[in-house]
Image (cartoon, grey):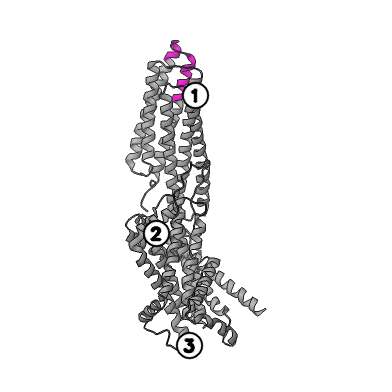
Amino acid sequence: MDLVVSIIKIIGSVGLFLFGMQILSEGLQKSASGKLKKTLEMMTGNRLLSVLTGFLITVVIQSSSATTVMVVSFVNAGLMNLISAIGVILGANIGTTVTGWIVALLGFSVDITILSLFSIAIALPFLFSKKTKSRECAEIFMGFGLLFIGLEFIQASMPDISSHPEILSFLSRFEDGSIFSILICVLIGTLLTMVVQSSSASMAITITMAYQGWIGVWTASALCLGQNIGTTVTAYIASLGASTNAKRAATAHTLFNVVGSVLVLFLMKPMLNIVNWITGANIFAISESEMHVVLPTFLATFHTLFNVFNTLVFFPFVKPFASLIEHIIPEKHKEEEEHYHFKYIAGRAEAPEFYLIALKNEVKKLGLLTKDMFFSWADLSSSDKVDQVSDKVSELKKREERADEMQDELTSFSILMLQNSQSPTNADELHKIIRVIDELESITDSIFNLSKLTEDRFGKGIAFTKEERNEISGYRNLTGEYVSFVVDNLNSSDASLLSSSRALEEKMDSEHKRLSNEVQLRMENNRGDFRTQLLILEVERNLEHIGDYLLNISETLVGGKGFDHED
């Protein structure tokens, strides 16, 4: 019964530690959201900047798992290439060692209860502030407080085994430094991290066990190696069902940590000796009473050295490593999915700004789809070939339905973000995204209407005169110019965009009035077929609607800050 109670206490303590880390991570992300976006822009730079970016983001959000899931998300959304992703993953593995240092330096050398309560006391008044920044700071201090309380509970929950020589005898078997013992401990460390889904939490457990005298240096070091393997599971799960490149990024993370751990297995004794030299204490010669004091810092140093060593080994070979991953997971050549799915993987504590970047990337795709649809219809409309008209209209129908699906999924996701958003800036951006999506989808509806009118014209054998053909062609070309202008500037917020857009829309209005008058005159003077004139009016009306939608998009973009603005 005592064993069951102890296990429940440990599980609850770990849960509190993880909850505190999540609150801390979310608070740090919110308060540093603008900087996080700028670090994303660094990721597409050189490899050294990618590594530095991965390190900085992981230090900020206190979770290498969240960073790697974020990376898989960006690769999946086409926002990052594989080489940059590998660099970020290398840096994230170094950044995650910071949590171990916090536990080693503060968890056992100061009164954690006082530290945690002091942190919560600072957070309390700010929790009720009306200012967003104040509440974000409160989350940071509250997260630290809960994290340290969880760590205190983990320590208190560890049963005293000094009076149980049979347990000590069993655990001491893994301290012989043999390859079998090390492999068993690596496996345990891997499984533990897979269960808690956090290498930081499993590292805290390992350091606590070492501090309490449960395990020695060989066992603890091997557990650290296993934790680096276990933490890759989160990113791998996130990549399931994602794009080929996303799977490649997750595989790169797994191979990097597994191969690195295997290398260190063969170099374990030299690595431990290097840590001895760095810490200035011979871990193999000190007494058992001193061991529990020195071992936490020793393990934090070993964890950092292990990840720095792996990064230095892999860094010169990032490009060949990326080529190897591409060979292991080849690109699947398949047709475009029948139905659209917004393939953006959500990290459990990911900053809203990163969702916005992925959303805006999808809106640009919708814009390109709209532009492609218009010029496909323009080619169909200007052609005299009756054959394959139905097939081309059916293809345009499929694209229009895809645009509908994109609108549904992206708008639903934007509304969900809007409900969870605490930032006025993010809310404004989301409202803008929803409006632009709606206007683009309306354009695709008009384009499909135009394709049906063209199909009717061919089906009823309606032929335009040279005058009528020139009128429609001129207005169609003007609309195409407007479509290209707006879609090509979806990432702009320059005031000149709106003035140029209004000039094009006024030109379209003027042309529409002129053409409508021409049609009216022909109908009054009985010139031309009546059905033809009505068809021309419908074509011009749909084109005029497209111009209105384009102006709405331009006004929305300039009214906000564009799609690639600096925060």
Q: Give the range drawn in magenta.
A: 521-540
Residue at x-position 45% and y-position 79%: 296
Kindly indicate the quadrant of the structure image that contains residue 491. Answer: top left
Q: Is mark 2 on a helix, strand or loop?
A: helix
Q: Distance between the residues labelled 2 and 1?
A: 51 Å
- Chain-order first, disc 3 or disc 1: 3
Residue at x-position 57% and y-position 82%: 170
Q: Where is residue 540 in the image (x, y as percent from the top left)?
A: 44, 24
The residue that label 3 is drawn on is: 288
The residue that label 1 is drawn on is: 455
Residue at x-position 41% and y-position 39%: 368
Q: Position of residue 171 (x, y in %)?
A: 55, 81
Q: What element carries label 1?
A: helix
The residue that label 2 is drawn on is: 86
Tell whether position 527 is magenta: yes
Check the image and report above or below for 295 versus 541. below
- Front residue of 518/271: it is 271
Q: Can residue 117 be seen in this view?
A: no
- Chain-order first, disc 2 or disc 3: 2
Check the image and report above or below for 446 versus 359. above
Q: How far apart are marks 2 and 3 (CA)?
A: 41 Å
Quadrant (top left/top right/bottom left/bottom right) for the N terminus: bottom right
- Chain-order first, disc 2 or disc 1: 2
Residue at x-position 46% and y-position 21%: 386
Q: Which amino acid does label 1 sit on?
A: Glu
